[in-house]
């Protein structure tokens, strides 16, 4: 009886569940007034949708967007087709509390138009010993544009090309200049139709003529090198562009910064807009671009010119087309390439230049943006300084197959290529020879005593090249008593060096080029380097660039990388160095070995987000020594905070301080790790738990100091999937500690605390050996040589 009653109850509840889940909403009753419609290619119509209840929003989609597009209002637009084509347009309603979801479909038959007349091309190809002006005309009233290409591989490819590989001339007549051997493809286009493709073979067999210029043979009417954001006051710069070091110093010595943008920094386009220029006779635009060709066809960038005199905007340059015309392929390798654009057509006009950047293409950087004209005064001789880059540019005619530069006095003497950049290491006056060849033909241009290299006063620069810690304040951090290596990085061939190292407690000097200095007193030091040669002197000064002793937060992030800190997101799966669905439990950062025994009492961590459903969850932080495999080994100390105690701020970096119960001892010469985690993660959405540390990511091959530990595993794995560091820094203390030596200066004198102990080589020691002689520094600033008891 009891079993029968249970079965009956189960049936009743099941039945109730079925009725409770039944969708009682109304049918939206969407439909088109007809199941199909015909439309002439190149025209448009409103989708004839029947929507009796006025439901919104309605979403429209097309089965083939390339020839039939439909906007949010239901307007259908069609493109050119060569045969009748049927496309399905779908109208969809997502549903609401009153009406169920619903769809309606419409078959759109796109009917081709009659083709346009073939244009007239004069001349129709041939062999010439000079550049040719080709005239293209049509008398077809429906033709609105002339399209042509010299890089398309076939008529079929050209027929379906866009402005990435073809040029467009508005109107029914145009002139095309052919200055190299090629196959010319031409057609006209109109609304929804086009003409047959005309093909013409041109062989340009111009006699070889060697000629060249240099970047010193021009005068720059405007120059922009993008060294800082202050330089961009007259430019219109979208937020996705930024100033960064993109290795332009390889092209222009001493140029540190460029303006750059990354392909995933935004959506749509980010136009970089210049000031308004008054273009002069024979003026041209030149700039350098840093890019690779791998995905340029997806979203090429262009140079557009807006002419305020005529009110027209014209695309003068398309990077993808330029790569085709110049046979340039770099695949996945970023390279600097020089771009030249003739502005002669705009002489006397006011113009504005726009670099139209489209996202999803490739990363890009721009530098040395100049408006230049030839300088007749530099036709016979140019002048440059020692080590100043000079770019030699071929202006040969005749399409040579080999171009050789002979540049005595430069680094390598001989070079190949249409453009070469060199430096001269010594003063003097040097010849330049350009030799070009094509099969058995050859031509040479030589200018005697063309390059004059003069000396220049040095430009002082230096670096601290010892294995010191990196700090958030961009200081080198070392213990007292440890030799510190300074390296001269000056340019201009200095012949003498004067170093000065100054703190509140001492001043040291050196006249060596690359001195090694042992600092015995704790403090922050300013460093000054003055270099001199026969031309003059120059000074480099860095305030508080070195901290000796004391304590400092260290991390593996440079000052230049701080602006790039952000969480590493796995989209809805969480974060690296934070909450995640992948079972990554703990994250560790490896730090170099201290140069002397040290301690750590606190660790500062910087969180981008601290959202969690478990505010009482314990977030553990630990210091590890290094295991034999190079990863985290034995735990030296642990501490923790509640998740609710973690700090973050969307507008600034805020530190969360983890403190250990006792200072953690770090041994001289032994690397160590700081590890954090696990972080709470519940559910399938990262919106529920979003704890994440700031990180900095680097290009392939950059520093990667992170290791991670998977849940339920006891084996740490080096992070090889991404090159990164976490914004997490232990506060290392190098302060010396008294350790058993007699704390007296001598009989009858006042006792003073021992501050540091050094061996006779100037190295600080923490455990002196008996019967060895050491230099002891006391709290009153005095030092004394004694034998350790």
Image (tube, rainbow, N blue to C red):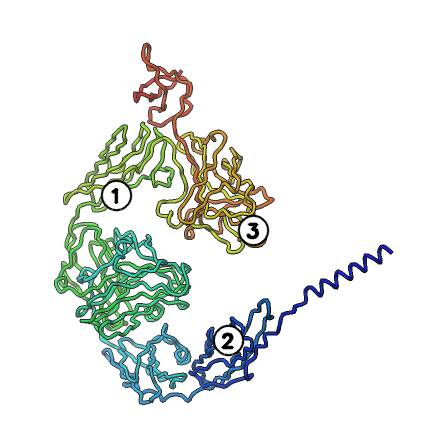
- The relative height of residue 113 versus residue 573 in the rendered view (above or below) is below
Residue at the spot 40% in from the left edge and 47% down from the top edge: 652
Residue at the spot 30% in from the left edge and 66% down from the top edge: 354
x and y, in percent, of residue 139 in the image? 31, 89
Which numbered mark, 2 or 3, is in the foreground of this view? 2
Which is more N-terminal, label 2 or label 1?
2
x and y, in percent, of residue 95 in the image? 57, 69
Which is more N-terminal, label 3 or label 2?
2
Asked if one can make out residue 775 in the rendered structure from this viewpoint, the answer is no
Q: CA distance from mark 3 to mark 1?
A: 47 Å
Mark 2 lies on a secondary structure that is strand
Position of the C terminus, as image quadrant, is top left
x and y, in percent, of residue 476 in the image? 34, 38
Q: Which residue is mark 2?
A: 62
Q: Which residue is mark 3?
A: 582
Which numbered mark, 3 or 1, is in the foreground of this view? 3
Q: Which residue is mark 1?
A: 461
């Amino acid at each position: 009886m009891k079993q029968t009653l249970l079965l009956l109850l189960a049936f009743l509840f099941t039945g109730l569940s079925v009725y409770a889940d039944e969708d009682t909403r109304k049918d939206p009753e969407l439909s088109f007034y007809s199941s199909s419609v015909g439309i002439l290619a190149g025209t448009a119509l409103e989708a004839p949708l029947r929507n009796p209840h006025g439901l919104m929003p309605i979403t429209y989609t097309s089965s083939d967007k390339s020839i039939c597009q439909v906007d949010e209002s239901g307007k259908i637009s069609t493109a050119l087709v060569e045969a009748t084509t049927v496309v399905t347009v779908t109208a969809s309603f997502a549903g609401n509390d009153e009406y169920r979801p619903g769809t309606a479909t419409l078959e759109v038959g796109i009917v081709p138009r009659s083709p346009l007349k073939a244009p007239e091309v004069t001349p129709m190809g041939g062999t010439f010993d000079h550049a040719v002006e080709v005239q293209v005309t049509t008398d077809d009233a429906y033709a609105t544009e002339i399209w042509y290409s010299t890089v398309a591989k076939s008529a079929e490819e050209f027929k379906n090309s866009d402005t990435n590989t073809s040029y467009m001339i508005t109107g029914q007549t145009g002139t095309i200049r052919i200055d190299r051997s090629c196959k010319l493809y031409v057609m006209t286009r109109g609304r929804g139709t086009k003409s047959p493709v005309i093909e013409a073979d041109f062989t340009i067999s111009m006699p070889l003529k060697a000629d060249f210029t240099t970047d010193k043979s021009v005068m720059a009417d405007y120059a922009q090198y993008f060294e800082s954001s202050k330089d961009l006051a007259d430019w219109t710069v979208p937020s996705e562009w930024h100033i960064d070091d993109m290795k332009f110093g390889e092209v222009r010595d001493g140029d540190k910064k460029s303006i750059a943008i990354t392909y995933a920094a935004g959506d749509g386009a980010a136009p970089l807009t210049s000031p308004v220029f008054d273009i002069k006779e024979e003026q041209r635009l030149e700039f350098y671009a840093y890019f690779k060709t791998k995905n340029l066809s997806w979203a090429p960038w262009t140079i557009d010119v807006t002419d305020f005199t005529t009110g027209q905007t014209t695309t003068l340059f398309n990077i993808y087309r330029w790569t085709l015309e110049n046979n340039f392929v770099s695949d996945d390798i970023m390279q600097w390439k020089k771009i030249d654009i003739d502005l002669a057509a705009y002489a006397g006009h006011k113009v504005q230049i726009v670099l139209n950047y489209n996202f999803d293409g490739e990363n890009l950087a721009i530098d040395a943006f100049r408006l230049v004209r030839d300088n007749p005064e530099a036709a016979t001789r140019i002048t440059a300084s020692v080590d100043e880059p000079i770019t030699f540019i071929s202006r040969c005619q005749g399409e040579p197959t080999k171009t050789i530069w002979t540049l005595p006095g430069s680094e390598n003497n001989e070079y190949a290529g249409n453009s070469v950049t060199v430096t001269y290491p010594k003063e003097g006056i040097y010849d330049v020879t350009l030799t070009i060849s094509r099969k058995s033909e050859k031509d040479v241009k030589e200018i005697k005593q063309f390059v004059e290299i003069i000396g220049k006063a040095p430009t002082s620069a230096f670096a601290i090249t010892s294995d010191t810690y990196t700090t958030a304040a961009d200081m080198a951090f070392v213990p007292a008593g440890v030799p510190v290596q300074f390296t001269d990085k000056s340019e201009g061939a200095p012949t003498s060096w004067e170093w000065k190292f100054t703190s509140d407690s001492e001043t040291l000097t050196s006249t060596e080029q690359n001195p090694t200095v042992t600092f015995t007193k704790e403090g922050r030091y300013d460093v000054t380097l003055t270099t001199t040669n026969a031309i003059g002197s120059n000074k480099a000064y860095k305030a508080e660039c070195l901290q000796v002793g004391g304590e400092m937060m260290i991390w593996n992030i440079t000052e230049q990388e701080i602006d790039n800190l952000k969480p590493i997101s796995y989209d809805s799966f969480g974060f690296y160095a934070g909450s995640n669905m992948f079972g990554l439990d703990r994250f560790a950062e490896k730090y170099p070995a201290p140069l002397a025994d040290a301690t750590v009492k606190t660790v500062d961590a910087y969180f981008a987000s601290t959202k969690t459903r478990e505010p009482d969850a314990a977030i553990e932080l630990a210091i590890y020594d290094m295991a034999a495999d190079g990863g985290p080994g034995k735990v030296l100390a642990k501490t923790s905070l509640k998740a609710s105690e973690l700090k973050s701020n969307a507008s600034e970096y805020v530190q969360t301080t983890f403190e250990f119960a006792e200072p953690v001892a770090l041994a001289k010469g032994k690397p160590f790790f700081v590890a954090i985690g696990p972080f709470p993660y519940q559910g399938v959405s990262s919106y529920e738990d979003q704890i994440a540390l700031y990180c900095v990511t680097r290009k392939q091959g950059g520093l990667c100091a992170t290791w991670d530990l998977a849940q339920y595993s006891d084996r740490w794995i080096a992070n090889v999937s991404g090159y990164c560091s976490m914004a997490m820094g232990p506060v290392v203390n190098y302060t010396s500690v008294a350790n058993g030596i007699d704390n007296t200066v001598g009989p009858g004198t006042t006792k003073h605390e021992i501050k540091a102990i050094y061996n006779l080589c100037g190295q600080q020691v923490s455990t002196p050996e008996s019967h060895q002689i050491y230099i002891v520094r006391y709290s009153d600033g005095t030092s004394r040589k004694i034998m350790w008891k």
